[in-house]
Every structure is written in structure tokens, then in C-alpha cells.
Image (spheres, rainbow, N blue to C red):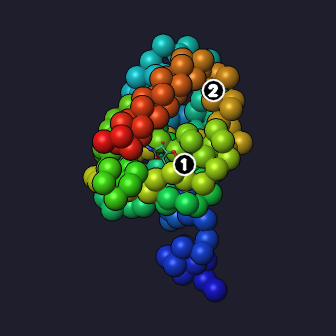
């Protein structure tokens, strides 16, 4: 079966890296990547050395509104930081959460190896920093502040989930 057909019918694990069309033209220059990295608040205290290290392990991806970035129940291989635009995390039939610039998603599957907990869809055209599983832990080692932010955000998401169960 054609790879695109398998993506469409859901029989192939879906993450945006595999889904996006091949990059045409010159790849993004290191300096341009660093410019995008510097716009994400959690990287704003990083030194030039750290930013260069981050630029080596990060892809900058642009996708149109409506792109499905993660699908609930499927394996996940990438972590996403939003540079521009907004996404909608469809956590359950009753709960949808909007995430915007500076926020992130896709951390849960990379941390525990479990399937994606929510479908995440681009609400607007978006620009994302994408880090694959292989480089995720190097990213956290390079930027301890991100680990702190991840833990705070995860605690908040657990609390919200518990609230909606009670609710
Ligand atoms: P992951 O499970 O890897 O893929 C789907 C992502 O949706 C998940 O990681 C989180 O980043 C995000 N997500 C899940 N639940 C919530 C929530 N309650 N609020 C915000 N984002 C969430």
C-alpha cells in the first residue's frame, strides 16, 4: 500500500516529520534557526554555544492550518515547541486546549514511551521547532530550565485532568 494512503487511513504511525513534504531549496541556515530558537522564552537565557548545539538537533517546520500533528493512540517520536501560530489539543470529547507561541506538546510520549495522549491539530498556519526522540534527552541536558518548565507543565496538566474527572 502507498505510504500516503497508510498515513491517511491511520495504519501508519503519524508524526509531522514523516508527513511533511520533502524540503525543497536550501535548508534553513544555522543563523536563521538560532533566530527562531531565541524567540522561544525557555531558550532566552541560552548562551551562543548552547543555541548552536540546539540548532544542530532542531528542525524548523512550517505547516498550514488543519495539519494533524499528533494522533491520539499512535506512537510518538517527536517533541514540538511552537514558534508562531496556535494548535488545538483534543484531549477528550469534552476537553480541548489551545496552545500558542512558547508552549510545547508531544513531551508525554517521549518521556514514558506510551502512545500519544491527544490529537493535536494546527488551528492556524504554524511554525514549530521539532526535536526527535533521539535528541530529546540531549535537549533537556543542554537546557535544564526546560526540564523545570516541563515538570511544572506536566503537574498542571495532571491537575487539570483530575479536575475534569471530578467535574
Ligand atoms: P503526547 O501524549 O506525546 O502527544 C499529545 C500531546 O498533547 C501530549 O503529549 C501533550 O503535550 C498534549 N496534551 C495532552 N493533554 C493535555 C492537556 N490537558 N493540556 C495541554 N496539552 C495536553
Quarter of the image with the N terminus is bottom right
**Left or right: where does residue 149 sit relative to residue 75?**
left
Expressed as whole percent of the image width and height from the top left, the position of residue 19 reads 52, 64
Examine the rendered structure and indicate whether residue 135 appears above or below residue 43: below
User: How far apart, in angstroms, are the residues tagged by discs 2 and 1?
Assistant: 25 Å
User: What residue is shown at x 52% (from left), y 45% (from top)?
Assistant: 106
- Could one spot residue 105 in this view of the protein? yes
User: What residue is shown at x 48% (from left), y 28% (from top)?
Assistant: 155
Of callouts 2 and 1, the N-terminal one: 1
Q: Which residue is the site of mark 2?
A: 140
Examine the rendered structure and indicate whether residue 142 appears above or below residue 69: above
Quarter of the image with the C terminus is top left
Closer to us: 144 or 62: 144
Examine the rendered structure and indicate whether residue 142 appears above or below residue 11: above
User: What residue is shown at x 60% (from left), y 75% (from top)?
Assistant: 11
Q: Which residue is the site of mark 1?
A: 27
Amino acid at each position: 500500500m502507498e505510504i500516503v494512503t497508510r498515513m491517511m487511513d491511520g495504519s501508519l504511525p503519524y508524526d509531522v516529520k514523516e508527513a511533511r513534504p520533502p524540503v525543497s531549496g536550501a535548508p534553513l541556515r544555522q543563523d536563521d534557526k538560532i533566530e527562531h530558537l531565541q524567540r522561544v522564552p525557555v531558550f532566552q537565557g541560552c548562551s551562543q554555544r548552547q543555541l548552536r548545539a540546539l540548532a544542530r538537533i532542531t528542525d524548523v517546520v512550517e505547516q498550514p492550518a488543519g495539519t494533524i500533528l499528533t494522533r491520539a493512540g499512535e506512537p510518538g517520536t517527536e517533541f514540538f515547541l511552537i514558534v508562531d501560530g496556535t494548535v488545538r489539543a483534543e484531549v477528550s470529547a469534552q476537553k480541548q486546549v489551545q496552545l500558542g507561541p512558547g508552549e510545547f506538546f508531544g513531551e508525554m510520549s517521549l518521556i514514558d514511551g506510551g502512545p500519544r495522549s491527544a490529537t493535536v491539530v494546527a488551528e492556524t498556519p504554524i511554525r514549530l521547532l521539532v526535536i526527535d526522540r533521539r535528541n530529546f534527552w540531549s535537549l533537556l541536558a543542554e537546557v535544564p530550565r526546560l526540564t523545570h518548565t516541563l515538570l511544572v507543565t506536566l503537574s498542571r496538566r495532571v491537575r487539570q485532568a483530575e479536575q475534569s474527572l471530578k467535574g
